[in-house]
Image: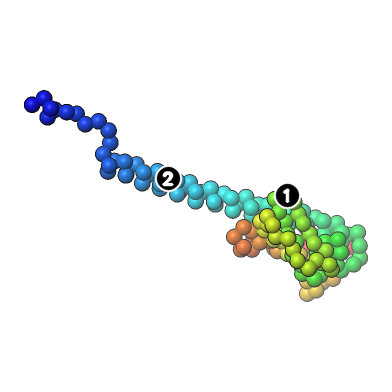
Amino acid sequence: MMWLRKSKKGFTLIELMVVVAIIGVLALLGLRLYTGQQQKAKNAIVKANAGTIQTLIQAELADTTSSSVNAMVGDTGENGLFTKSGIHIPDGSTQTENDTTGVIGTVYVVYDGTLGEESFAINGNGFDENPVFTIALTAQK
């Protein structure tokens, strides 16, 4: 009769499966939260870089009387791409293909004649390719 009183130590298969399922759900939730934070950070980079471009364009327009900014993206509608390492603004008159290695967003600087002489619009696209914002600026004389 002594051999019937043997105690069982350890976890059952069902208990182990429940623990693994809980860990899987927690990992999935953590991954979704992490991805959302990455998108927010990349969109913040888009906004910061577009603000820098706005400042540079306004400074250039204040220094010249031209309706295009040759040092920046001109009235050709070329894209200015930026990466984590900094802003890359191609010369609109000579750039034929943009290097998209490491690109995390796009800022479009477009001359808009309907807004008046020397007016530009800056449209920023974030991580999810949805427009984040638009900045319209006109040179102050």
Q: Give the residue at x 78% y 68%.
A: 96
CB under 8 Å between discs 1 and 2: no
Q: Is residue 128 above or below residue 10?
A: below
Q: Is residue 38 above or below residue 92?
A: above
Q: Which mark is residue 112?
A: none
Q: Is residue 16 above or below residue 43?
A: above
Left/right placement of residue 36 relative to residue 26 reads right
Q: Residues within 10 Å of mark 2 (few under 14, many from 20)?
A: few
Q: Secondary structure at mark 2?
A: helix
Residue 88: x %, y % from top left: 77, 57
Residue 64: x %, y % from top left: 91, 62
Among the 4 quarters of the image, the one containing residue 16: top left
Left/right placement of residue 110 relative to residue 22 reads right
Which residue is nearer to you in this view: 131 or 93? 93
Q: Which mark is residue 85?
A: 1
Residue 108: x %, y % from top left: 73, 64
- Say whether disc 1 or disc 2 marks the residue closer to the N-terminus: 2
Residue that badge 2 annotates: 26
Residue 31: x %, y % from top left: 49, 48
Q: Secondary structure at mark 1?
A: loop
Q: Give the residue at x 45% y 48%.
A: 29
**In 3D space, how far apart are the residues under numbered discs 1 and 2 (Cα atoms)?**
34 Å
Report the amino acid beneath label 2: Leu
